Every structure is written in structure tokens, then in C-alpha cells.
Image: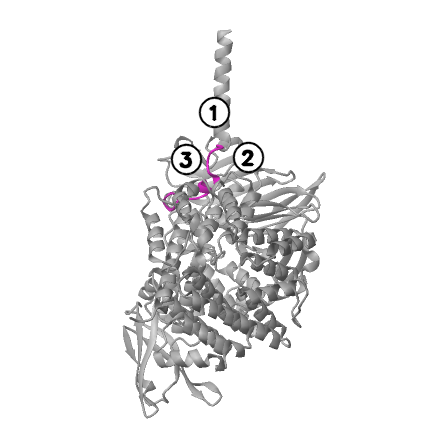
Amino acid sequence: MRLFSLCASLLLCLLIGACQSTSPGSKQSSEKSLGISASVAKQRASRVSQVSYQLHLDLTQTRRFKGEAQIQFELADTQQALSLDLQQALISQLLINGQKLYPNYDGHRLVIPASLLQGGANLIKVNFSSPYNHDDQGLIEFIDPKDGLRYLYSHFLPSSAQTLAPQFDQPDLRASYRLSVLAPSNWQVASAAKVQSLRPQGDNSLWQFMQSEPVSPHNFSLLAGPYQIWQSEAEGIALQLFARQSQAESIDAKSWLAQTGQALDYYQQRLGSKYPFSHYTQAIVPHLPSEFRANHALTSFNENSLHGTPRREILRALAQQWLGNLVTLKWWDQLWLNQSLANLIADDGEAQLFGQTDNQQSFIRSPVQVEQQIANSLELFSQDRQPSQNKAMAQLNQLKFLLGDAHFYQGIGQYLERFALQNADLNDFVQSLESVTKQPLSQWSQAAFKRAGVTSLKAEFSCRGDRITRFNLRQDNGDTDSIQRVKLGLFTLGRHGLHKNLVSEVSYQGASTEVKRLKGVRCPDLVFSNYQNKAYVRVKLDQVSLETALMHLSSLEEAEFRRMLWQSLWESVLAGELPLPRFVGSALVNLPDETDPQVLIAAQEKLKQAKALLEQMSPNQQRYSRQALNAIAQMSLRLSISNKSSPALQSLWFDNYLHFAVSHQAKSHLAALLEQRESLPGVTLTPERRWQIVTHLNRYDYPGSERLLLKEKRNDSSPEGQVAALGALVARPVAREKRQWFERIQAHTKESDPQLLEKLTLVMRHLYPSEQKALSQASAEQRLAELAALDRRNSQTFMKSYTANLLPRSCSYAGLVRLEALLDRPEGFSPMTLRGINQTIAAEQECIRVLEAMQPNP
């Protein structure tokens, strides 16, 4: 009996050990383990080379898929163990160079002992099964709610290719893939290589793919499901378009594939390089964390961000096949390079092919440096990449302007030729340009891409007898050693407004540069020192130009230049150089004459930011705030009525009116429109707009708004309506209800129901709007005190929303000190939360600058 007990105990221990070795630990954070450190990647790349994968995947079952992987590679030494990345799998068999091994596996890393490795060629075989994912990473399973059909698609950026199969999941270990897939017989399957054969196997089909070119793991892909498929050909390249069956009728596949063919032809001519792969597949998938994801020969598009046939996205995604897949980054700190290059040449292509661009390039100047150190691949998600990518595109555009289009594109062509199917970095790109232009560019690139801050550029001039006698360009916080180049625009005020008098290309270097050629030119009323946006600089208007712009901006002929001027004026407000009332006054003078929708959208967005700032300042500037918001609301209503012959402008003005309708009279008018007691000719209250009105009335506590909410909720039972109703309910300024929602947010953990996270993300957006400052301050101290604990037990997705919406702001030095104290907490914060804290501190500093600029001088 004792022997039996001992054996049973031993067996139990072995079973427990086996479970721990072959399956993921339940308390491990899969989110953190997905990351690959830069140091591990560098060490592994120094030992491993000539990698190839042979994968067989069985996708016939729901919830989990089965896989067989053979990994071949060359190893430089056998001095230490080697790890393979494999996420949350169950391993059923492991062979190292033909020898069976019990897996040393913690659910994240599969460790291969040095004793079983050999110098030179190695072969590892792994049989495993893994779960499908249902978020934004890995092999994603989606059940279409409209027809119940099951679809799979992958998203492996930056390091979740390891959820598909065991891999060396880092960008500089490119590998060839030989894939076979068993899938239901009514499915389509696509990947990085072309299909070699398709054979029936009972109720299923076996798809065999050709061997791919060397691919970085994050650029490998898999698409499988009962997709609708359209096919075409361009320049000898097979083109395919995939979409869910329930979405097929809404897709203009003919136009989509035709635009792809146009882009393909343009790029091959412009880059002097043939399309690098044998086929190109595009897929419209349910959800991605970005607009699209361009993998090796296969791009997935996020259907939630599509509007018709997305010309810009098609162009940008195809450009990334050359810049991103043919040539790939070495590590994540330079992901910006190839993506920004691709976007820049795509925008050039859009202008060339269609005569215009849908992309309205952001003119917001961010002080962040383009290249930021990423110690772990997971940090890629903890950074807001948009500002640095905008800056990178602008700096690359400046480089193109400096070198000339011909030399710039010749340099790109050489870069693609030298590093085809390899990994490259900024130095490699710059050296390619230098070899073409024979110009030293290393110092320029270091300052442009690795230096923080924003350069401001100001024209300083004097006139005599209506002629320029002196003209200098002064740069502050700039790279004074390198040569920069801009276009100067000089404008003169005439009887019918501002007219372009002269455009001059100017190179400048150092703190101040004299522009001698402008001596004797007619004295301008407005000078813009970055005309056509050729450089990444903040234009600081001289006093004469500032006064002219404030009063006569609308009389400028070029819409894009008007948009740039609005941005320049707004940047002056945020810098504390231009009082906010002067900006608002200029909007009241100039915007009634604005006829370009894009310019109007940009200017109205600035007014909305101004409104938020004024509400955060409360009770400071309360009287002015009330007057300004009422004036903007009245202007918006008047222009909603007068623009009924222009539906686009009327719609923009009405939506602006809705945003600024904070007086009792304006809210009463909105309620009357909602209940059809009044109407505005030409304005249609769509369900979305009706909910915007309901939310606005509840947010600003209009009498009877709760009744209107309940009525609208009864009339609109759609999923979108239910979401909107929740937002309106949370926005109500009722302390008790706010507290209940707040406690649910504070109690959340990453183990909570995923649907609850989606709901709470919406709640956080509506809980403390800018005008409900007193309600926000009631829980402010608790939010700050519990932030570190909340950070430890929640995901990046949760903390991104929390820090964006719930870190308290008061537009005061006391509030600023309170936020800055978070940075001294010994326990520290995750990268995502730290980023949110720093962004909130910057916003608080900005608000204080704006407030102080509004104070009368002593």
C-alpha cells in the first residue's frame, strides 16, 4: 500500500511537471511574453543563419488549430542553449536533430539545450496545437455575425508570428517558408507564396504552397476562410482581392483591382524596379489596429476604416511591398523608415496618377525624435507612432527637395537593388543616397531623425519706400550646421485680397541667413517661410504677417495654404504667443467665407480644441468663454442656413453648431429639431446625428434630456444605437451615476470579460468631459493614488484609454505638480501608462501657457 502511494505520488508529480512543460502557465502574462528584447535578438542573430520553415497547419477545427513545424538553420556555435519563440501552445512531440526531447517550455519560449545542438546544420521538428486569437494579434478567428461563417486572418506585427508556429520571431532573421494547409473544402487560402497544388481530402482540401522568398516572420501571413474572391492581372502579376461573403456586394472589386494595376505600373517605372514577388493578394478583414497591414505579397485592409475604394491605402500598401517587404528593417526602432518612404512615394504617386491627393498631411509639429530606442518589441505598441511618422515623412520630403526628385528616386532605386530580400537601416539608406548624389548626408540625417525638438523659422525684414531693404531667415532650436531648403512665399494685400507676389527657393544654414536676392522686391504684407510645406519647421509669423493673416486669411486663393496658415496660427496659440481670443476673432471674421471643406474641417477642429481649453480653464475666463462659444454657435447656425445650396459645407457647419450649442437657447433649438418641432432645410438628422444631439443635451444637462435619451433608445434598437445610448447616459452630470461607473472602471483587471473592456473604453471617453471639471475633481486624488495598482493588473489597451481620458486635468500649476509627482513614484509604470502621463503633463502645460497668454499685462 505504501509502495502504491509512493508510485501514485511520483506519477502525480510527473503529470504536473509535464503540464507545466508543455502548456502555458496560467498566471503568466501572454501580453508581456510576446515581446522580444533587442539584446536577445542581437545575440541570437549572431549565432543563427540560413533559416527555413516547413509548416503544415490543420485549420478544420474551431477554437484551436494543429501544426507540424520543421525548422532548419545554421548555428555558429554550441556554447549555450538556444530558444525558439512559441506562444501559448500545447506541444505533443519535439525532436532535435532526430532525437526526441521532453520540452523545456514555459508557454512562451522553447529552450533547446546546447548538448543537442550542433555546429552547422540543425533540424528541429515540433508537433503542437494552439488557440486562435480573437483580438488584434496572431492568427485571428472571426465568426461573421451576419451569416455565422468562420474566417481566419493573421496580424503578426511586431512579434506574434510565434502564435502561429515555433519561430525565431525577430525581423533580421529572414526565412523561407514552405506551407501546407488543411482547410474545409469551401475555403480559400492565401499566404506569402503562390499556391502550388490543391487536392481534396474528404470534406477538406489540402493546399500546398510554393517555397517563399526569405521573409521576416512579422511579414509572413495566412488568410483562410469562405472568402469571396476576385482575380485580375497587371504587368504579368496575378492580383487577387478577398472579402467576407456578407461584405461582397458593397465592394467595387473592378475599381479596386484597376487602381492596384495603375499603381503597380507607376511604381515599376518610378522606382526603376519590377514588382518583387510573383503575386499580390489584398484582403478586406474585420478589424486591424491600423488602416492596413502590408505583409509579404499580401495586404490586409481594415474594413472599419474603409470608405468606398480606398485609393490612398491601396497606393501606400503596395508601396510597402518594395519598402518594407523587399527591404525590411533590422530592428523596431527604425520601423518608421521604410513605412515613411513608402507613404511618401505613394502620395507622390497619387498626385501623379490622379492629379490630387486624398491625404491631408498633418502640419502639427511634434517635438519627439523620429527614431526612439525600443528595447523590447512590445514597446512598439506603447508609443504613439503617428507624430514621429509624420515628422519622418516631412523630413524625407525635405530631403527630396534638397536633392531633387531625380536624385532622390535614384537613391531609393539603389537602396532597393543593394538590399533586396535583406534587412537594412537608416545608414544603409543614406549611403545609397550619398553614392548617387556625392553629397555628405550623414550629419543631416542624424539631426533630422535622431534629434528631438521642433525648429521654428521666422522671416525678419525691413522696407523703405515699399521695397525690401533687408531680409533674413532666423531659425531657433534647429540644426545650424546642415543646409536646409524652403520655399518663401511673399504676398501683397490688394483691392480684392491677398495676392501671391513672389515664391523663392532659399537655402539656409546657421542661426540667421541673409537672403540678398530679395533686396529691392516689393515689400510684402505677408511672408510665409515654409510655403508648400517643404520642411519640418514651425513657421513663426512676423508681426506684420500675423496681423495680415488674422484679418485677411480667407482672401488667399490657395486652399492648402489657408489650411497651413490656420495651423500656424493655432501653434502660436499653443505656444502662448498669440492670445486665444485673437484666434477665435480671426475665425469669426474669416471662416464665413471659407468654401473648401478640408480647410473648414481643419479650422473647426482648432475651434473645438479651443472650446475644450476654455472649459478646462473654468472658472477662469468664464465670461469670455460664454461669449465666445455663443458667438461660434450663432455663426455656425447662420452658415448652416445660408449654405443649403452646398450640402458638404452645410453639413460641416451644422455639426459645428451642434458642438458649440451650449447656451439654453441653442440647446432648446436642438431639442426642437430632434422632436421635429422645428427643421433646417437641407439638414437631415441621420441616426448618428440624432444620437449626437441626444448625447450633447444630456452632457450639458438640458431639462428633459433623459426623457429624450430613453425615447431615442426605444426608437433605435440597433447595436450602434445601444452603444450611443450608453455614451449619452454616462455623459450625464449626475455624481451618483458617475461614481458607480468610476468604481467599475477601477475594479477592472485584464482577466475581466473582453466585452466589458469594450464597454468601459466607451465609458471612459464620456465619463468626465471637459466642462464637468468639478465632477472630475471629486475622484481625481483616488485616480492618481490607485494608478500604479491599476497599471499592474490591466492591459495596455485599458491603460491607453484610461490615461487618455481619466488622468485629471485642471489647467493649473497645482494640477501640473500633482501629475509630475507621478513620475517620482518608486514603483514606476508600464511604458504605455508612462506615455499617457507624459502626454497629460504636456497638455496641462499647454493649457497653462494659453491661459497665461490671455491674462492682461500687469
| Residue 70 on image: x %, y % | 52, 38
* Farthest residue, direction bottom: 465
Above or below — where is 66 with respect to 142? Answer: above
Circle 2 is placed at which residue position?
A: 128
Which label was assigned to residue 158? none
Circle 3 is placed at which residue position?
A: 118
- Residue 753, image quadrant: top right
Badge 3 crowding class, 10 Å Cα cut-off, few under 14, some 14 to 19, many 20 or more, is: some
Q: Residue 31: within the magenta?
A: yes
| Residue 702 on image: x %, y % | 57, 59
- Give me the residue at 33% from left, 85% from top: 517
Circle 1 is placed at which residue position?
A: 17
In depth, the one of 542 and 168 nearer the eye is 542
Q: For the magenta stretch, what is the residue range? A: 25-40
- Secondary structure of residue under mark 3: loop
Q: On the rendered structure, is 543 left or right of 69?
A: left
Please identify, in this view, whether the residue under mark 3 or under mark 1 is nearer the observer. Answer: 1
Kindly tell me whether residue 252 is visible in this rendering: yes
- Secondary structure of residue under mark 1: helix
Badge 2 crowding class, 10 Å Cα cut-off, few under 14, some 14 to 19, many 20 or more, is: many
**Mark before the other along the chain sequence, 3 or 2:** 3
| Residue 197 on image: x %, y % | 65, 47
Task: Estimate the spatial distance between the alpha carbons at disc 3 and disc 2, rounded to whole Å.
Answer: 24 Å
- Residue 337, image quadrant: bottom left
Amino acid type indicated by mark 2: Phe
